[in-house]
Amino acid sequence: MISARLGLYGSLLVAAVPLALTIAVGLLSLLPADSALHVPGYVVTLLGKYLAYALLALSVDLVWGYVGILSLGHGAFFALGGYAMGMYLMRQIGTRGVYGDPVLPDFMVFLNWQELPWYWYGFDHFAFAALMIVLVPGALAFVFGYLAFRSRVSGVYLSIITQALTFALMLAFFRNDMGFGGNNGLTDFKDLLGANLQAGSTKAGLLIATGAFLSFFFLVCRHLTQSRFGKVLIAIRDAESRTRFLGYRVERYKLLVFTFSAMMAGIGGALYVPQIGIINPSEFEPANSIEAVIWVAVGGRGTLVGSMVGAVIVNFAKTVLTGTFPEIWLFVLGGLFIFVTLFMPRGIVGLFTGLRTWRSQPAKVRKQLTGRALEAGE
Amino acid sequence: MRRWVSGLLLLCAILPALAGGRLARADEIDDAIAGFAGNFAEVEQAIGALAATDDAVAPKILEALADGRLRIGPDHSLYIEDAKGALVEARTGAAADPPGKLKPVKVNNRVRRAVEAAMGQLTLLSPDPGQRMNAADTLFRSPDPGRLPALEQALAEETDARVKALLEQARAAILLMVPETPDADKIAAVETLAARGDQAARVLLGTAAEKSSGEIAAAANAALKSIDRELAFWSGVQSVYYGLSLGSVLLLAAIGLAITFGVMGVINMAHGEMVMLGAYTTFVVQDLIRNAAPGLFDYSLLIALPLAFLVAGAAGVAIERGIIRFLYGRPLETLLATFGLSLVLQQAVRSVFGPSNREVGNPSWMSGAVDVGGLVLTYNRLWIIVFSMMVFALLILLLRKTALGLQMRAVTQNRRMAASMGIRTDAVDSLTFGLGSGVAGVAGVALSQIENVSPNLGQSYIIDSFMVVVFGGVGNLWGTLVGAVSLGIANKLLEPVAGAVLGKIAVLILLVLFIQRRPRGLFPIKGRAVET
Amino acid sequence: MLMLERIGLRYGAAAVLKGVSLEAEIGKITCLLGRNGVGKTSLLRAIVGHHPIADGKIIWQAKDIGGLKPFERARLGIAYVPQGREIFPLLTVQENLETGFAVLPRGQRRVPAEIFDLFPVLATMLRRRGGDLSGGQQQQLALARALVMRPKLLLLDEPTEGIQPSIIKNIGRVISLISRSGDMTILLVEQYFDFARELADRIAVMDRGEIVLQGAASSLDSAEIRRRITV
Amino acid sequence: MNAAPVATIGGTPESMQPLLYLDGISVSFDGFKALNGLSLVLDPGEMRAVIGPNGAGKTTMMDVITGKTRPDSGKAMFREADLTQLDEAEIAALGIGRKFQKPTVFEMHSVFDNLLLALKADRRPSRVLFASTRAIERERADGILEMVRLTGMRGRMAGELSHGQKQWLEIGILLAQEPELLLVDEPAAGMTDAETEQTTELLRRINETRSVIVVEHDMTFVRALAVKVTVLHEGSVLAEGSLEHVSNDPRVIEVYLGR
Amino acid sequence: AEETIKVGILHSLSGTMAISETTLKDVMLMLIDEQNKKGGLLGKKLEAVVVDPASDWPLFAEKAKQLLEVDKVAAVFGCWTSVSRKSVLPVFEQNNGILFYPVQYEGEESSRNVFYTGAAPNQQAIPAVDYLMNEEGVERWVLEGTDYVYPRTTNKILEAYLKAKGVAAEDIMINYTPFGFSDWQTEVAAIKKFGSAGKKTAVVSTINGDANVPFYKELGNQGIKATDIPVVAFSVGEEELAGLDTAPLVGHLAAWNYFMSADTPENAEFIAKWHAFIKNEKRVTNDPMEAHYIGFNMWVKAVEAAGTTETDAVIDSMVGVAVPNLSGGYSAMLPNHHITKPVLIGEIQGDGQFNTVWETSGLVPGDEWSDYLEGSKDLISDWRAPLSCGNFNAATGKCMGTVTQ
Ligand SMILES: Nc1ncnc2c1ncn2[C@@H]1O[C@H](COP(=O)(O)OP(=O)(O)OP(=O)(O)O)[C@@H](O)[C@H]1O
Ligand SMILES: Nc1ncnc2c1ncn2[C@@H]1O[C@H](COP(=O)(O)OP(=O)(O)OP(=O)(O)O)[C@@H](O)[C@H]1O
Ligand SMILES: [Mg+2]
Ligand SMILES: [Mg+2]
């Protein structure tokens, strides 16, 4: 809706922002440290993290904002993408691990693993890992979605089983026997495609890559949602059964979007891991997925732009607040969430772009714009 | 043979001691006491020696030692600190003026065990049947052939049937150990133990079967088999009971949510914090009681219950008035607001009460366990089961049988139309949310008995609670009950097989698969009513 | 007596009612006619308080109720049969009827037997969930539910929609009966002209948010009315 | 019960294959039989009015035909297709369209988009993804808007329509689908007499090329349609024939029309 | 403003770990305060920079970066869980910062930039098992732990150790539960059953954090007394016991390097200062607090010795620094960046304190690479020049891939 108003050029402009921003920041970070325009590495990593989260938020908005699937488990796809990347990075360490084992990652050596489990095969090749980054989350989403949408699980039931899914994955990845490093996860990465991860240029490159992916996926999502296809999605969101009676195979639409969105989240995770330097099972925590939903709500659900803005703003606020008000930042952040809900029903983006049109909306429609009624009455 | 003799001696020694206390030779006691200055091994020896003196002061000293109230001076003289902190000379009981710096006599488990054994020996003929029972139990668990005469003597005099049974089991245990026992007696002993039928008996029988041959071994093996069957049966029952108990905890945690979420449709992420408020109310109540009226401690939970309901309920009403009511018709946004709220509440509690766990004690009627058949039922769990069922029954009555219940459901199904029927929707909304929160608070009182009372308490239950409500079918209180109990039982049946972690994963996966089969939970509301 | 004075109502920027004035007398049936989308439903929603009015006054029993909450209006004896039924889908028929008790003093909280004479089908379906009923049955339930409140002012928005002919006839009879025998004020929105004509004491015709024709039923010309409500 | 071969009741030549064939359909909800051995045959190109008391099972019958409700027993064929084996979308794709008793439209889409979504087209996700709206589609949608007199509301959100307007929009959606068989549940409800007449007109016109089953309680409307009438009662057929014929049936008067 | 030396404090103040870590932040503030009262360091005042990584591991890395790059702190005191340490490790190495890590951990790590002031496995687990074996005559063992790296490693080491001591495989039961586990009925019943086989049985608990309270409550209620089956824990200290009624738990054990009950003047002074600082007489002290006390004093000494807060200089002068610990001895920084510590075994008392029932006669040096694990028994760590290697393989004579770089 909002991006609808943006029009094609507006959207291109929006899409250009992450790319331009990351190129600028990336290049400036390469300037010598004493230069006035130098951007410290700290900022590069932070921005990279925000944008990776923005990609996750975008993927959540696609399924929640446009198809009405409130996924409380999207963090799982993000984490799986992250693990796929992490496994590749692990294998790149080679003999530089603390035990110097050429094949086994450190955590396997010290827990007496004798050989590399089969599911680690292939991860020494980047192409394979890249494939897995989209394939693993995609396949999981496909199987899960196939089952759920076929039997028409919807609403909170779907939300809660997505949550159960990520919770189960979290417990599984916590297990040391799974061969993914247990609680400590995968860490100690050295290099990516031969480039030293600690080097400024690699960081800048990763940042720019993140920006590029974000821009690209924003455009793809925009097309998905603005086209006839997008109209079908919204129809499904608002009146699923009616859409069926028009002859649309609702479950296929849902499955397609859900799977695509999971792949997007997976890519987000894969970009996140090398910049953060660790992936561990807490990424599967249900609270993380809920947070992603909250970024979207704060930014403005069903607007695409809003989801990205929300992710960046909330995380930026978190960065600032945990540093400056370590004792009370939860009050501020929690308060922010309440404030946004009460006073900015369409999120931050809604505040800027939609104010005029918003006011002119009839109350009932306004309500519907901000959330579908659970109850029969409203 | 020496043991027998010493046993007899002991017996002779104890009898007069109980009859009024014999005065041991002073040097005997001095020798014994000197050991208390040494290391744990020496203390252990000293205990034995002291008990052997049979002096009337021995039990007093031993008791003080077990309680950590025994002090020793540089000259190895012993002092007992009484409850008020005053010192008395251990041997005379006279008020003391210690000669130098006193040191506590150190105890460890080894010492405690020695004291227990010695006390057992000193209390086999105690007038208090409870003490005799303990003594008999101690004997059973560490059967000592040397004690047989004392045991038989006690057995002859015993009148209490339960103590008698225990004594007989102890006797059987000893008889089985002693090679000289005639075969017939041994077989009788096997039978006695077989009748006891628990793990401890099984161990004794196991050794007996290994060590002996022929008839006795056969009898022991048969007894072993029957015990194994019985134990397997009871362990199955026990697992189900554990499941029931876990289920009742889940039910308690979820039942408030079944109202705020199930009935009202508010995705209440702050539900766990309401539970937490209830738990902290319990803490505050207990803290006040501890400081002001320690005698009331056993009633602390009864006092805390209504208070927790009020505190959490009031918080619920405030939340409804302040936030939720602006969000009716936007249920998904309640997720965002209540998530924010839960952060705020957690941090608030952290600021007020500190981040660490707070101590909430079990009143005496919720401590310990009772054996029923082969089951060990811990009182706190038992009460929680009873309590959760009571809360459930009350809520069902309230929702189904009262006008308020009807209005609650009407309001959430169609707020506008309910208002036009003359229902005070805002009051009903506040009451409903307050009720759900209040019930969560009450749950907090119960959970404080088995859980950490910390700012994170709520967090640990929120996911499970949602799962229970959804699994049972949103809006169906019976579903919540059955959902909670079946999740609990499934968990506890899987746990011994797969381990806690895999068991939990399996339950989650089963849940996901189950929802595929029944997309609206266990007890879905079917028909047109939900489709439109 | 219900008096509407220059009611204005808007949905966002769109003004849907523009100065509607209308009176409904006690013991009389006032019938409001008009094409689709002219604002009939909106007017009733204004009276019961489902939508705030922008202008004007709603006077009921000599009191301005424009500022009251919906439930307060219901407690003043106003009952509403909305368009689209709006029964409580998950409550049983019995419970749906009992929601009307909220406005009654304790002693009067029962469902009058006449209701089941009028809608016999409801009596056989007391345990069934409201949402499971057929469309027409739901409409009957909505009517019955309003009657349980023993209202003084009954607002009916196309009450015959989806109801089978024999029952419509009954409803007609009952409506005129209760209005004439008692002190009930009835405001009826109808599209079904013959039905309205037969019942109405007064008729008002609406177009584009305004009353364009109004008067005693006997004094108005059928053809004129028909012309006003056709495109 | 009513399981006798029904094909003859309509007087159709045996050789002609019926378009819709319901035989012995029963549906029960918690023991209550909403349909009880219902049989009905509709020929290609036929328009049929279905009447009957509230709760007779008319809407349930449509639910069965459109796949919303699975019958407990009985046969439901649309040409060669067994409707009981298909889901809603597949049935819709066969060419069965429906207007619901309670108007249901896409409230968050504009009136125009509602029609656009309904226009007959390939509905597979892969196709829809790359479909662009062609001029001819716009024209058709606008034509339908004209027909249901909602041109003035073209850009408004469907959620903002009044009850009657939604009824019209839903009829428009049905038209846009160009189905072979239209199931129309109470199209005249909430319409003025004049509008009802227009609806009659519209249905007649549609019936020139398509088959229609229409449910309505408005006898004037049914009379104006002048087609064969089936009276349902308690889940099965009570009477069938011209309106004249059935409205003189004392049982129909008793349970439905009243005196 | 006058120039200050900044000290970073990286402990979670919110989220699941706040329960343990908040105290450590407070103790650091106290220590810094004390130091400033003494006139600061190198003539400058110390300034604490507190951040909240919120029990969120990526946030730990981010905050560490902020401390080092933006605030430019001279040293950081922080982390509790292993994963938080793993998460910040690359940050410290890349930015060449200094981290003091105060918690007992699984070992198998050595970094030039990290000083491990908590216990390595050999400073806690093995002495505890020895005690139970010798003093209590334990023959059967339950290794009960939370499923993560520390218990896994510790149990692996213990299993190897026990077997070497002749304990049969069927006399060892190992069980893991998830984080925050709260329903212990089944597990406690299993322990009870395992312990009723006629041999003296003990439980070695590596149960973590919040799971402990319900575990001990269940133990108490099911009537498992310390005299029957003692439980020795490595993660339960005074702070954890503060949330419990300890009366039913008297006699269960814990192994640490410090107990609040230590009867030394240093400890009395420390407790007094702590109570004054936190303004609450009831607050307890515990082992990680002591570790920070030691670490902080070592850092102060090293900075004074180096005459600068410059990282490389401080790191070089750290090794060999010895400061008094609170149990009445001197702890020294070893070349492997671990410290020497006494090992104490304490029994829980009714008042929530520990009664030391045994202690090592001397100090035990922390061993980062366990001698009981296949992969690491040949490794040693020595950060002094010229070796300067965290994982030198004594068998091959090579410095393996290093953590630094
Ligand atoms: N929630 C709303 N938001 C915006 N516009 C609305 C809303 N509800 C109704 N409208 C508009 O207000 C006008 C009057 O609607 P109303 O429902 O009052 O008509 P009505 O006379 O009852 O029509 P009908 O006979 O179809 O029921 C219509 O044009 C409609 O489009
Ligand atoms: N899910 C259900 N549970 C119970 N009863 C149901 C259910 N669905 C329908 N019914 C009952 O089945 C009967 C048939 O309903 P149906 O809607 O088909 O009637 P109808 O002929 O369309 O009536 P109307 O003319 O009022 O629209 C009704 O009595 C209704 O109450
Ligand atoms: Mg209307
Ligand atoms: Mg119908």
Image: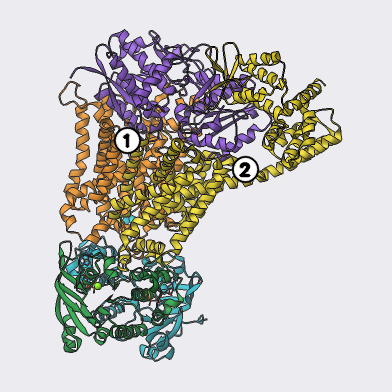
Chain colours: A orange, B yellow, C green, D cyan, E purple
The quarter in which the C terminus of chain C is drawn is bottom left
Q: Secondary structure at mark 2?
A: strand
B510, above or below B416, in the image? above
Q: Most extreme residue toward the front, as rendered?
A: B94
Relative image position of residue B364 (x, y in whole percent): 55, 40
Crowding near the residue tagged with mark 2, few <14, some 14–19, many ≥20 C-alpha atoms within 10 Å: some
- Amino acid carrying mark 1 in the image: Leu
* Numbered circle sitting on residue A271: 1
Q: Nearer the viewer, residue D256 or B279?
A: B279
- Ligand 2: image quarter: bottom left
Q: Which residue is mark 2?
A: B370
Distance from disc 1 to disc 2, alpha carbons, whole Å, reads 57 Å
The structure residue drawn at horizontal position 38% and vertical position 29%, both measured from the top left corner, is: E21
Is residue E75 positioned above or below E146 on the image? above
Q: Are marks 1 and 2 on the same chain?
A: no
* Picture quadrant where residue A20 is located: top left
